[in-house]
Image (cartoon, helix red, strand yellow):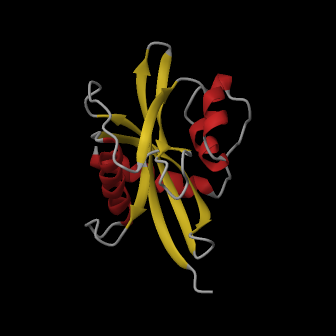
Amino acid sequence: MNITKARVACGVIIKEGIDGDEILVLKRSPDDHWPHAMDLPRGKCDGGNGGTNTNEKLIRCLRREVKEETGLDIDPLGYIDQFTYMADRGTRETTQYNFLCQMKDPKQEVRLSREHSEYIWVSSMGQIELMLMPEMKKTVSKVFNNEYKLVDYGMASSQLAIDETINIYLEKIQ
């Protein structure tokens, strides 16, 4: 079997809500390959994202995918983490890079693409635990309602060097 590799950029979009910070969660369309699954805005990065720097390509991909899926213009605040999973029935090894983001204009309205049928702003880690896939729960738990999370997922020490490199790049572009 021939396994391809892909990179995905994901935005954990946070905003101030009535009861504290809220995170945007999307519901996949009924005709999607994961119908009705809850998800975060994310998408594949291809070679056409411009720039020669890998980090620059990830940030361009992140902004493009969030805009396509939600209609929102965002600013990445920082790199959270990454994880790898198998997709396309085990034929694609995908690494997902997760970024904490805020909307450029807090008054923007979400406009979903055909990939998603609904969205919700979630205000507790307990809700996240019920909605998202395990790896995404770990990502969100690193930035959201730490005092209320049900499980402590921790962080691998090998991840620290990657985190630092991407955060340095984010500081340079802001």
Q: Where is residue 163 in the image (x, y as percent from the top left)?
A: 52, 52
Q: Position of residue 162 (x, y in %)?
A: 53, 58
Q: Position of residue 31 (x, y in %)?
A: 47, 54
Residue located at (50% from left, 13% from top): 19
> Is 86 located above or below residue 1 in the figure?
above
> Is 113 located above or below residue 14 in the figure?
below
Q: Where is residue 44 in the image (x, y as percent from the top left)?
A: 42, 62
Query: For residue 52, which quarter of the picture?
Result: bottom left
Q: Residue furthest front?
A: 31
Q: 39 or 23, which is in the foreground? A: 39
Q: 152 or 159, which is in the foreground? A: 152
Q: 25 or 98, which is in the foreground? A: 25
Residue located at (29% from left, 26% from top): 106
Residue located at (60% from left, 62% from top): 84
In the picture, the quarter occupied by the C terminus is top left
**Residue 51 as seen in the image, left or right of residue 87:** left
